[in-house]
């Protein structure tokens, strides 16, 4: 795929900014776990109004590791919150597992959310609880009452993220990287079908960022293996990572979607982004290709406006 | 001039929106309550925090208010040769107004601020969102235990404040100012009326639930980091105190007019009770 191809992929198919590859997403198929159809979301009123999403359409396919990249303030975290139903779109629809979130009441949303989990940017560990209690929380919330089973799962998940024997520690005793790992252990404790990662490497050093990226891949593969081993075969695991760290994005992603100015400007495998970042752009390269190249290369000069 | 009108309109609309949000929060609490208390451990913790841990500050408040009231009234009444009224006046003042209002104000300060700060901090650090994503409604997990604890523990604390206030008042007049215990105590026993406690406790139930609801709502609406938590906490404290004073005014008037209804109910209950006793007596005799 050439940069020109990527430009074609990134080019909005219509005035609403629907990316070529995602196309019209009005009717999702069975392989789509999450579908955004022309979603608009804004905050505030009058002169203080901002609109981070201005017609985003995208599909998340079952079993993939999708990374959403983009400069700060382009609505990446808002996108994740819309997927969880923590926010409602102003217009357009968000469909998860074939169900339009706007049509669900609080109980139905609660049931759907138990199949999803999110690793928050800050970790969002409950600071009044120990690490073990944090990891056990989703299990208890899902109705598990067998304390021996809970303890076994907690120990297993903490071992899985490289934090063995930390059950009794308070969250304040953990370093930034350890908090992220503990939060990841909590995210996977209830064996979700969809895991959302909101800026999982923010505030971490490059080595720890790489370790977290490895952990995301490892966790995804381990859960996929569990799905493959499931005799009923009706489980799956889909990971969606929001980041502006291109190293993490390239390492983790099966597919990368780039958001800018409230719209999808790129949607392609990581190799295409790398190629676009390293090659010299042809003179007739589109604006979206220039944006992607600027972001991948981390340059201030270019079509992406920076706030200084 | 136009600016003032806009500001007034905005203040009114914010107030109405706040009232609406509190009403919705109350309805959501009642909806969860109808399904039973799921988070029992958190509820017991809140009963302990709001009830037991507030006891020292409530006892101190009650004692000092009862003491200074007695001291002031006795010094005035003794010049009019009605010093023996002091105990009864302090009793009435404590039961009808001072204990319910002061306990509520102290709780708004001690407990209300803590509730808003805790929930507000959880909100700005995404812990509330984390609860939501795990399919746990923050209203069920965080708000309901606090509202229940406020509702039940405020009347209990009010009773303690009344007792310690009257005790401190008697101590001041008898032990410090040299009055006769008998002349202080007898008017109190003469003036005691069950409706006094209906009055005090009814108000306390409402104050307790109101403080918890206002403070939880402010916590859940907190935005903007540490500064936002500070603002939400201040706003919760001010709103709770104003709500307590306004509700006290409204409830005092309503409860005054409720007195005849209470008397009729009381007569009816006495009649039923006496009828039941007569029936049982005759049944045993037969």
Image (spheres, coloured by chain):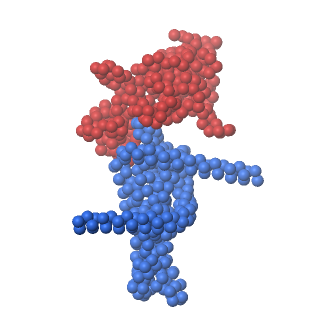
Chain colours: A red, B blue
Q: Left or right of A193: which side holds A268?
A: right
Looking at the image, the residue that sits furthest to the right is: B1
Coordinates of residue B161 in the picture (x, y in percent)? 42, 69
Q: Residue at x 34, y 25 (%)?
A: A223
Vertical side of A93 occupied by B79: above or below: below
Instruction: Name the quadrant containing residue A217.
Output: top left
Q: Residue at x 55, y 56 (%)?
A: B239
Vertical side of B216 occupied by A192: above or below: above
Vertical side of B283 occupied by A294: above or below: above
Q: Left or right of A143: which side holds A6?
A: right
Q: Residue at x 51, y 52 (%)?
A: B214
Q: Left or right of A60: which side holds B277?
A: left
Depth check, front residue: A249 or B193: B193
| Image quarter in which the C terminus of chain A is found | top right
Q: Does residue B121 appear anywhere in the picture?
A: no
Depth check, front residue: A197 or B21: B21
Coordinates of residue B105 in the picture (x, y in percent)? 50, 63
Q: Does residue B72 appear anywhere in the picture?
A: yes
Coordinates of residue A206 in the picture (x, y in percent)? 43, 31
Coordinates of residue B222 in the picture (x, y in percent)? 53, 46
Q: Residue at x 45, y 47 (%)?
A: B29
Looking at the image, the residue that sits furthest to the front is: B286
Depth check, front residue: A210 or A217: A217
């Amino acid at each position: 795929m050439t940069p020109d191809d990527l430009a074609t992929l990134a080019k909005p198919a219509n005035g609403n900014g629907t990316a070529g590859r995602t196309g019209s997403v009005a009717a999702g198929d069975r392989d789509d776990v999450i579908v955004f159809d022309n979603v608009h979301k804004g905050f505030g009123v009058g002169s203080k109004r901002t609109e981070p999403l201005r017609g985003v359409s995208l599909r998340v396919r079952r079993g993939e590791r999708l990374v959403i990249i983009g400069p700060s303030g382009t609505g990446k975290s808002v996108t994740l919150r819309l997927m969880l139903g923590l926010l409602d779109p102003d217009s357009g629809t968000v469909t998860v597992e074939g169900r339009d979130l706007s049509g669900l009441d609080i109980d139905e949303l609660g049931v759907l959310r138990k199949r999803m989990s999110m690793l928050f940017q800050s970790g969002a560990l409950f600071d009044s609880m120990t690490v073990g209690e944090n990891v056990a929380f989703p299990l208890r919330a899902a109705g598990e009452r067998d304390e021996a089973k809970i303890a076994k799962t907690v120990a297993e998940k903490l071992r899985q993220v490289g934090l063995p024997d930390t059950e009794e520690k308070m969250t304040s005793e953990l370093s930034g990287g350890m908090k992220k790992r503990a939060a990841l252990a909590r995210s996977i404790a209830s064996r979700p079908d969809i895991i959302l990662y909101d800026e999982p490497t923010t505030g971490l050093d490059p080595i720890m960022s790489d370790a977290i990226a490895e952990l995301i891949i490892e966790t995804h593969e381990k859960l996929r293996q569990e799905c493959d081993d499931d005799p009923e075969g009706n489980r799956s695991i889909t990971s969606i990572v929001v980041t502006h760290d291109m190293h993490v994005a390239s390492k983790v992603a099966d597919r990368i979607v780039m958001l800018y100015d409230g719209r999808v400007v790129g949607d392609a495998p990581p190799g295409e982004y790398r190629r676009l970042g390293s090659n010299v752009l042809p003179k007739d390269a589109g604006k979206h290709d220039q944006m992607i190249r600027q972001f991948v290369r981390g340059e201030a000069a270019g079509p992406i406006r920076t706030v200084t | 001039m136009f600016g003032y009108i806009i500001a007034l309109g905005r203040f009114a609309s914010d107030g109405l929106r706040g009232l609406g949000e509190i009403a919705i929060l109350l309805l959501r609490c009642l909806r969860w309550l109808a399904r039973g208390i799921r988070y029992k451990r958190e509820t017991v913790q809140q009963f302990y925090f709001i009830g037991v841990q507030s006891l020292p500050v409530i006892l101190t408040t009650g004692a000092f208010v009862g003491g200074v009231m007695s001291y002031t009234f006795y010094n005035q009444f003794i010049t009019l040769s009605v010093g023996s009224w002091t105990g009864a006046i302090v009793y009435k003042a404590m039961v009808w107004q001072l204990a319910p209002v002061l306990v509520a104000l102290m709780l708004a300060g001690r407990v209300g601020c803590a509730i808003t700060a805790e929930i507000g901090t959880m909100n700005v650090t995404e812990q509330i969102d984390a609860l939501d994503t795990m399919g746990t409604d923050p209203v069920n997990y965080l708000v309901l235990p606090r509202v229940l604890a406020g509702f039940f523990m405020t009347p209990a604390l009010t009773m303690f404040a009344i007792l310690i206030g009257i005790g401190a008042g008697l101590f001041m007049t008898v032990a410090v100012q040299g009055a006769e215990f008998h002349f202080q105590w007898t008017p109190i026993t003469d003036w005691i009326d069950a409706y006094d406690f209906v009055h005090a406790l009814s108000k306390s139930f409402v104050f307790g639930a109101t403080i918890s609801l206002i403070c939880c709502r402010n916590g859940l609406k907190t935005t903007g980091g540490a500064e936002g938590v500070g603002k939400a906490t201040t706003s919760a404290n001010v709103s709770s105190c104003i709500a307590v004073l306004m509700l006290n005014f409204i409830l005092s008037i309503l409860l005054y007019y409720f007195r005849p209804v209470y008397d009729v109910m009381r007569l009816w209950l006495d009649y039923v009770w006496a009828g039941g006793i007569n029936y049982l007596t005759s049944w045993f005799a037969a």
